[in-house]
Image (cartoon, rainbow, N blue to C red):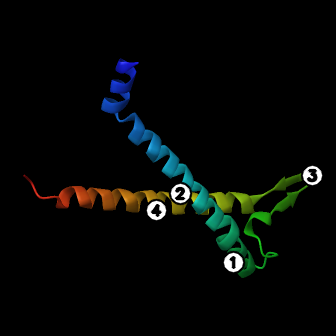
Amino acid sequence: MKDFIEFIRTRGVVGFAVGFIVGKAVSDLIGSFVTDIVNPLVGLATGSLGDLSAMSLQIFSASVNYGKFISALITFFILVGVVYMFSKVLRLEKLDKPKS
C-alpha cells in the first residue's frame, strides 16, 4: 500500500484526475451553452423553428441531420478555444514567476 501511495504522489495521478474531472465539467458546461443558447439563436437567424439541431434534409427515406453536426462543430470549436485560452494563461503564469 505504501508503494501505491508513493506512486500516486510522485506520478501526478491526483492532478491528472482533477484535470480530467474539471475538463468533463467544462465540456458539459460548453455543451449546455451551445445546446441551450447558441442553437436556438442560430436557428432563429437561419429561419429554423428555433433550434439549430433540429435542421435536417430528407433524401428519399434517409434523414440527414446536418443541424446536429453543425451543433457538434460549434461545441468543438468553443471547447478548443477554451482549452487554448487556459493553456495560454497557465503558460503565462509559469513564465512570470521570478527565479529564485
Q: Are marks 1 and 4 in contact (CB under 8 Å)?
A: no
Going by the numbered disc 4, the residue's amino acid type is Gly
Q: Badge 3 is on which residue? A: 61
- 72 displayed left or right of 9: right
The front one of 62 and 31 is 31
The percent coordinates of residue 28 (x first, y second) are: 61, 56
Which image quadrant for residue 13?
Answer: top left
- 37 displayed left or right of 48: left
* Residue located farthest toward the front when viewing the structure as drawn: 2
Q: Badge 1 is on which residue? A: 41
Q: Residue at x 60, y 63 (%)?
A: 74
**Counting other residues with Cα less than 10 Å from the Cα at mark 1, is it few (<14), some (14-19), or many (20 or more)?**
some
Query: Mark 1, mark 3: which one is toward the viewer?
Result: 1
**Vertical side of 83 occupied by 5: above or below:** above
For marks 1 and 3, the one nearer the N-term is: 1
Which image quadrant for residue 16?
Answer: top left
Q: Secondary structure at mark 4?
A: helix
Q: Badge 4 is on which residue? A: 81
Q: Are marks 4 and 3 in contact (CB under 8 Å)?
A: no
The percent coordinates of residue 89 (x first, y second) are: 32, 62
Q: Secondary structure at mark 3?
A: loop
The front one of 97 and 37 is 97
- 75 displayed left or right of 64: left
**Counting other residues with Cα less than 10 Å from the Cα at mark 3, is it few (<14), some (14-19), or many (20 or more)?**
few
Q: Badge 2 is on which residue? A: 26
Q: CA distance from mark 1 to mark 4?
A: 20 Å
